[in-house]
Image (spheres, helix red, strand yellow):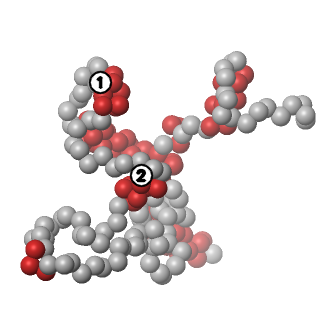
Amino acid sequence: MRRIALISLIPLALAACSNQGLRDLQPTSDGPDEFLIQPVKPLERPDNLNALPAPVPGQANLTDRSAVAEGVAAFGGRLDTSTGIPAGDAALVQHAGRMGVQPGIRASLAQSDAEFRKRKGRFTQFRIVPVDRYSQAYKNQILDAHNEAERWRNAGGRTPSYPPQDTRFR
């Protein structure tokens, strides 16, 4: 009896050792991921085939759509193609950089985040069923919006965007 129990636990222990990464979310079907498919513009025949620009590797095709540009246009805005900072945002950029700008901040943060997840991963490595390891690693840093709004409300702070307090059942 003891031997059967031990033999049945071996596959479970081996399955628990596999680490699929931070997000162990599996697709539910064998079909394509509909969020990765982007529709393209219809093909157009140019007026002069000899005047076509040379293709540049890594650059967008003429039929590729831009979700950002289409979103800006849908809301009545204009897509700013200049590389400079718009005049309306100059004060914001100046205020954000008033204490100086650390070069390489993205790489530094990515490295410290990887080290943090590696430390936290030691305790979340062995699971029998797939779990969301990202939520496990950052569970102490998650903000509960409801509790935070109640904390502000109880402290006398204004919470105009939060639903009014229901006092009928108190």
Q: Which of 120/134 is in front?
A: 134
The residue lying at 22 percent from left, 43 percent from top is: 83
Which residue in the structure is indicated by mark 2?
72
Rendered residue at 61%/38% (across/down): 144
In the orientation shown, which residue stands out farthest toward the front?
A: 47
Judging depth in this view, the residue of 8 and 139 nearest the camera is 139
Amino acid, disc 1: Gln
Name the residue at 30% across, 35% down.
Answer: 86
Q: Which residue is mark 1?
A: 94
Residue 30 left/right relative to 38: right
Q: Secondary structure at mark 1?
A: helix
Question: Mark 1: few, some, or many residues within 10 Å (few <14, many ≥20)?
Answer: few
Q: Is residue 134 above or below residue 4?
A: above
Task: Please tell me how crowded label 2 is: few (under 14), some (14-19), or many (20+) other residues with Cα within 10 Å.
Answer: few
Decide: is 25 above or below 37: above
Residue 91 is situated, as x and y percent measured from the top left of the image, at: 33, 24
Disc 1 from disc 2: Cα separation = 25 Å
Residue 48 is drawn in which quadrant?
Answer: bottom left
Q: Is residue 56 above or below residue 94?
A: below
Q: Is residue 53 visible?
A: yes
Q: Position of residue 46 (x, y in %)?
A: 21, 78
